[in-house]
Amino acid sequence: MRLAIILTFTFIQLAACGQSKSKHKPSNMSNDDSTKIVKTDAEWKSQLSAEQYRVLREKGTERPFTGQFYLHKERGVYVCAACGNELFTSDMKFDSHCGWPSFDKEIAGGKIKTELDTTHGMIRTEIMCGKCGSHLGHLFDDGPTETGMRYCVNSVSLDFKKQ
Ligand code: FE
C-alpha cells in the first residue's frame, strides 16, 4: 500500500514536470520557420530595386536620417524587404537618434543570424535575415533599454505590415 502511494506520488510529479516543459516549448518555437530562401544574384536583381539590391545583397548602408522607417511610429510588424520574414514588432523600436531605425530585440525563433564584420576598419556584428541571408544592418550592445541591445537596421532592408 505504501509503495502504491509512493509510486502514485512519483507519477504525479513526473507528469507535472513534463507538463511544465511542454508548456514552454510552443511559445519558444511558434515563430520558427527554418525554410531557407536561396536565389541567384540575377533573381534578386530582378525582384529588388537598385538601392535594395545594393543594401540587402551587397551589404550596403543607406545614408543616415534618410530612410522611410527612421521616424516611423505606426503599430505593426517589420519584415525583411527581400523575403517577408517577420523580424521586429513596433514595440521593439526605440528612438536611437543614430539615423537608422533601431530595435532593442528581435522576434524570437532564429529570425536573424549574425556574423563578425571586420570591414571599414571596425569590428562589428552584422545582422542578416535568417531566411534569405540578406543584409539588414549591425547589432550593438549599447542600447538604452533593459535589453542593452541596439539592432541598427537599414530602412531599405525592411517592409512594414500595419497592425
Ligand atoms: Fe529575408
Image (cartoon, grey):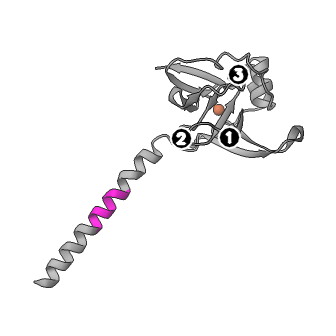
Residue 23 image position (x, y, % from top left): 35, 52
Residue under numbered circle 3: 156
- Asked if marks 3 and 1 touch (Cβ < 8 Å), the reply is no
User: Disc 3 and disc 1: Cα gap in Å?
Assistant: 23 Å
Mark 3 or mark 1, which has the lower sequence index?
Answer: 1
Closer-to-camera residue (132/103): 103
First in sequence, mark 1 or 2: give its number: 2
Tell me which segment is drawn in magenta: 14-21
Residue pointed to by mark 1: 142
Which mark's residue is nearer the viewer, 1 or 2? 1
Give ligand 1's quarter of the image: top right
Question: Along the horizontal axis of the image, is 14 left or right of 72?
Answer: left
Element type where label 1 sits in the image: loop
Q: CA distance from mark 2 to mark 3?
A: 23 Å
In this rendering, the label closer to the viewer, 3 or 1: 1
Q: Which residue is mark 2?
A: 33
